[in-house]
Amino acid sequence: MKRQLLLPRFLLLAVFLLLEAASLYLLNRNAELQRTWMAQGSHWFMEKVWGASQSVRNYYSLAEANRQLALENFALQEQLLRCQDQLRSQYAEDQKVDSLSGYGVIPAEVIKISRNKQHNYLILNRGFADGVQEKSGIITHNGVVGIVDAVSEHRAFAFSFQNSDISISVRLGKEGSNGLLVWDGIHDNGAILKEIPLQNHYQAGDTVFTSGHSLMFPPDIPLGVAGKAKVVNGATHEIEVTLFQDFSSVRFVTVIHNRDMEEIEGFEL
Amino acid sequence: MKRNEFWKAYILLLIAQLIISNYFHFTPFVMLSILPVMILSVPIRVNRFSLLFLAFGSGLLVDWLSEGLLGLNALALVPVAYARDSVLRMVFGNELIARKEDFTVTSNGLASVTMAIVMVQTLFLIIYIWVDSAGSRTLLFNFGRFMASLVAGVLVSLLTLNVLATETRR
């Protein structure tokens, strides 16, 4: 019954719209001012409606854009490591010393990360099937994120740098003294650089780099900037470091593995 | 017979509208039109589809034979025809439509009839003035034109209704 009533109503509306369209068409053809006005109206409509829909489309394509950027970032990191590798090899050749460098890199995405504990962790969407191995480092272009602890076929469990058990061997400045960098346990981007001998020169604002001594991370990855320092036990400096890495937004990472790790560890046994 | 008389009166008023459109140019503030009330008073028994086409045809004829823009009166009058039954229902209630009776000042009261005329005139004038100015006039001018045209249009429409009202012609 309702359907029977709806059909004539739709037809009536259709005829109404048809006649209005015909009137507008006649106006458009015969009146210059109205033609210009309608053209302006149509441009406004196109700008607002299609412009808005384009913004929505752009917003929803951000995930894809991020993925593309991450892949690009990964390719650049790989290129950078290869360049560093070449430089080191060249240096070693010049010095007549064999190069021990050589890192494999794998792009990965963080699928879970904890940030509100003292022993934080993260889970990656890559496992041993993708080439990820235990004791691999996890980095981004902003610095170190963590260390892989356990690997399954398609997932990897890692200790976040925001974990009080993790320390990284670092160097203060390009040629400065070595120390250990640990999370300060409080801030998202706060760390403490320990064991810097008192006699070593230090300036606030110096960049902290990976030293390359840990075997998990290649040297010269910038991690943060040194801040205030205090003397501990009258023997060493403890320096506050502001990290470049923002752990609240970490998503795309690079897993980095030292190909020579087993060989080097063999010497240590 | 009554039906024929209505259509004769309708044609005469259409000619009157043509004369108004061609010669009534005393002030740019007043746009006098009796077309809305003519559509309002078309007998209810006339099919709504036919009413839409009648409004379109009447508007187009006035546009074509007067100095107006072709399509402007048609554009403003077709919505009046589309909304006619809703206006009648709102002002006079559902019974008038259900019984397919025509409204008159005597049976429905001057206030209600004036209200219905104001509503269709308003709808017509808003579209007419908005499209006619095409963004080239200020809002204040358009508002002044609308108010002056509404007052003049309602007064002339009330007089016109006497010509069209079936009861008067009995």
Image: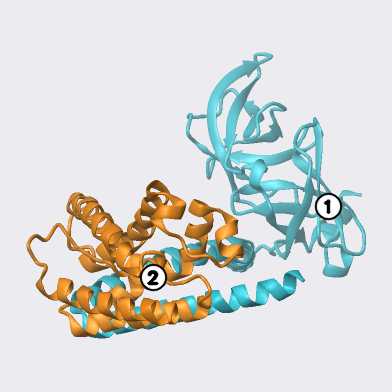
Q: Residue at x 56, y 66 (%)?
A: A57
Q: Chain of mark 1?
A: A
For disc 2, the marked residue is: B39
Task: Give left or right: position of A93 versus A169.
Answer: left
Give the x, y percent position of residue B120: 38, 60
Q: Nearer the viewer, residue A32 or B27?
A: B27
Badge 1 is on which residue? A135
Along the viewing direction, whichever of A197 and A71 lies nearer the viewer: A71
Q: Colour of chain A?
A: cyan
Q: Is the residue A31 above or below the residue A209 in the image?
A: below
Within the image, what quadrant is residue A12 found in? Answer: bottom right
Q: Which mark is residue B157?
A: none
A244, above or below A205, in the image: below
- Secondary structure of the residue carrying numbered label 2: helix
Q: Which chain is orange?
A: B
Within 10 Å of disc 2 (Cα), the crowding (few <14, some 14-19, many 20+) is many
